[in-house]
Image: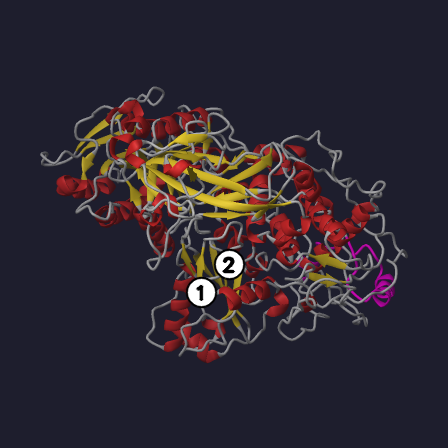
Amino acid sequence: MSQQGYVATPPYSQSQPGIGLSPPHYGHYGDPSHTGSPPGMMKPAGPLGAAAPGGMLPQGHPPHGPHQFGQNGAHAQGPPLQRFPGPPPVNNAAPSYAPYSPSTQSSYPSPVSTSSVAQLGTQLSAMHVNSYANYGPQMAGAQLSYPGGFPGGPAQMAGPPQPQKKLDPDSIPSPIQVIENDRATRGGQVYTTNTRGQIPPLVTTDCTIQDQGNASPRYIRCTTYCFPCTSDMAKQAQIPLAAIIKPFATIPSNETPLYLVNHGETGPVRCNRCKAYMCPFMQFIEGGRRYQCGFCNCVNDVPPFYFQHLDHIGRRLDHYEKPELSLGSYEYVATLDYCRKNKPPNPPAFIFMIDVSYSNIKNGLVKLICEELKTVLEKLPKEDQEETSSLRVGFITYNKVLHFFNVKSTLARPQMMVVTDVSEVFVPLLDGFLVSYQESQSVIHNLLDQIPEMFADSNENETVFAPVIRAGMEALKAADCPGKLFIFHSSLPTAEAPGKLKNRDDKKLINTDKEKILFQPQTNVYDPLAKDCVAHGCCVTLFLFPSQYVDVASLGLVPQLTGGTLYKYNNFQVHLDSQQFLNDLRNDIEKKIGFDAIMRVRTSTGFRATDFFGGIYMNNTTDVEMAAIDCDKAVTVEFKHDDKLSEDSGALIQCAVLYTTVSGQRRLRIHNLGLNCSSQLADLYKSCETDALINFFAKSAFKAVLHQPLKVIREILVNQTAHVLACYRKNCASPSAASQLILPDSMKVLPVYMNCLLKNCVLLSRPEISTDERAYQRQLVMTMGVADSQLFFYPQLRPIHTLDVKSTTLPAAIRCSESRLSEEGIFLLANGVNMFLWLGVSSPPELIQGIFNVPSFAHVNTDITSLPELGNPYSQTLRMIMGIIQQKRPYSMKLTIVKQREQPEMVFRQFLVEDKGLYGGSSYVDFLCCVHKEICQLLN
């Protein structure tokens, strides 16, 4: 494999001062004092230069010398460099269709006269370098506008086109190409996990995984599969060492489910010193009577019941019969020592809590929920061998007060009990509140029919929120079982009660150092409430239906810290949006879940887990507590050295999750992974996984949002990207001209993905994105696995007009840029949360007819949120494609129909992540230039 991945020469040969980046902040977000470079890092030579006003280059100061982008550089090792054959070069001199109305353009006053632009244009062989990495608020006003603009850039200027060469986007690394290359070489194959430190196929590649001693990449992915031997080396490269662990990941039907090991009352065999569980990393010695722990090297006696003789290579004779000796992942039945109060847990419960305030009754939401519950309760999760689910269910409705319902099977009709004291919530009944759905089905159906009528005349519009969670938790506590609350809520809780909130949506805080307040909860009620919930195994999932500001940062805190999920449906309308909500509700109720969970990540000597990100609560530095964890939730774990690592023994990780199953059995789920170690930086870079790196960078940045100014976080991300690549350039690449950008093969698309993260609305505010939406997206990303974060930051864009209706394969994805769209085309874009169908003004009428059953583009109704089911091949194929894209995604994506040149297209364009943002945020090409400049400054 080539040591050098991608080599190119950017449009300038020397770094210029005056681009307006403050000196790099290295190191951890949490500590704003870390502005200098710690020892072992390359310091930039001299200051990075004062900014010209607004981050512009001074007029008449063009960069030096034209250079071609995409030249191959001097190159000693390895085969010739990879080229990036893309689609044929597009003409980027002008956008693919007429610019918007002048109002959009005027947000970009051009600070440079047209003639000086033309002058620059002729001197540059590529786009001009402007405001790179200067993602601050000043960007919107100070961008150089070019005749014809950037590829698909919004800033267009009138006047005759000037002859200038553009940087060809096809000559820079394409995420689509990288994904396709991996699919071509590794797709459809069997990937066996028998080798330590091997790099799995990309998360976008479909293959079959066979566990042969290391956990499947479905459960654990790493930012690099080869750790540096020393902490100095780690500091030098600045590549985060992290694992993204998804302990309950869904396994396809053609892969073996986890084996369950039961050692009876003795329980799992564990190391006496470090308490690691028996696994393939334990070495048996002395004829099988003792074993040496792979994690702490302690020599332990083998318990008599577990003894087995060794074969001629020192392996136990029963090696392949025992999952814990031959597999990377397996489960143990836990003994009573692993249970609360040393007694077996009761089966969990689901409690449904419905906001019955005036607006929810009037818009039909309450009726919709009650009708749907009758259906979904038939599908409560159960163990494979169970006839019916062991879960119990309970029901509460609320507005300013709480209504508990007795649905005991012996009752003729349900009974309601009202709790008016919301400051000290108590549970008014025990017997009859949590029941078996099978036994109480008729009483429950009776209740669900009555609820919408019961509150039909209520005019109460004020609601409480914290007391609702408290009531559910107290009910689970009283029943001595773990469980999950499903809360259906729609407004800011303004009624007099604990957790009461006020509208604090203050746009004036945006782009100030106080912006972080918008992401913090506004009262200190919710954090201790979340802590209590976790202590009692109470997970909270919240379905929000806001029509205005509801303070997601406050309401979402308990769901986040208890391992629950937050779903948000803005301006919900039953006739348009119910399908999306119902899909989410069904999926959430049916998915694989573990309750009352505690996770511990153990490592071999030399390094340890130091930081954790996800839907978790930490009472100490080692135990990751989760009231529940489901198949879609990932925990990202960062590791740091505390000693040297050896190339021989590698770096070993064991993740153990203790949890209660849906049937009330206490179990341990174990995942083991062995990584390589090296004292060569080149090995570290060769083994990186960019998708995992972006997952880590996103979560660490989104965690930092609570404490640090956004501008500082963005600078840290830009600097760390430059630093990682500069270290590669300096230590691993063969010598070549400074004007060349050299990227490691495994990180070819790190700059484009990093730019997508920097432009996300959490890190860069935009006028049309609400504070609640930013808090919501922040929360979504914090629990995402690698596949979900990959799609979220770099959406899939597929042409639909080239559909082959006879084929079942998806149309090939294209790059997310406006220059790839065409007026004659129809394109589908999906990012895991949203789905858009974009219609070009000249879309083929037969396609429009086939998909929408209307004669032309003009007749298409853009209000619809689902496509009509028509019998023709176009309709069936497109709906099938949308189904495939939706599969395996945790959220039901809402479909929006977008017509070219109509106002809603502005929202769609924000997802074309390779283009310049409408409100700041560089294009991919600009960002690549910016990073290259930073690298040059670090190397000088």
**Residue 129: in magenta span:** yes
* Secondary-structure class at tag 2: loop
- Could you tell whether 869 is left or right of 199 in the image? left
**Residue 770: in magenta span:** no
- Could you tell whether 397 is left or right of 544 in the image? left
Q: Quadrant of residue 121?
A: bottom right
**Residue drawn where x is 67% and y is 74% of the image:** 89
Task: Name which residue type carries label 1.
Answer: Gln
Give how far across and how far down residue 490 sits, in percent: 39, 40
Q: How many marks?
A: 2
Q: Residues within 10 Å of mark 1 (few under 14, many from 20)?
A: some
Q: Which residue is mark 1?
A: 189
Q: Residues within 10 Å of mark 2 (few under 14, many from 20)?
A: many
Give how far across and how far down residue 153 sits, in percent: 68, 61
Closer to us: 306 or 416: 306
* Secondary-structure class at tag 1: loop
Residues marked 2 and 1 touching at CB (< 8 Å): yes
Q: Could you tell me if residue 565 is visible in this image?
A: no
Mark sitting earlier along the chain (2/1): 1
- Could you tell whether 323 is left or right of 53 in the image? left
Residue range corresponding to the magenta coloring: 102-130
Marks 2 and 1, Cα distance to the nearest angstrom?
10 Å
Q: Could you tell me if residue 446 is visible in this image?
A: yes
Q: Which residue is mark 2?
A: 201
Residue farthest to the right? 60
Closer to us: 871 or 588: 588
**Residue drawn where x is 31% and y is 42% of the image:** 361
Task: Name which residue type carries label 2.
Answer: Pro
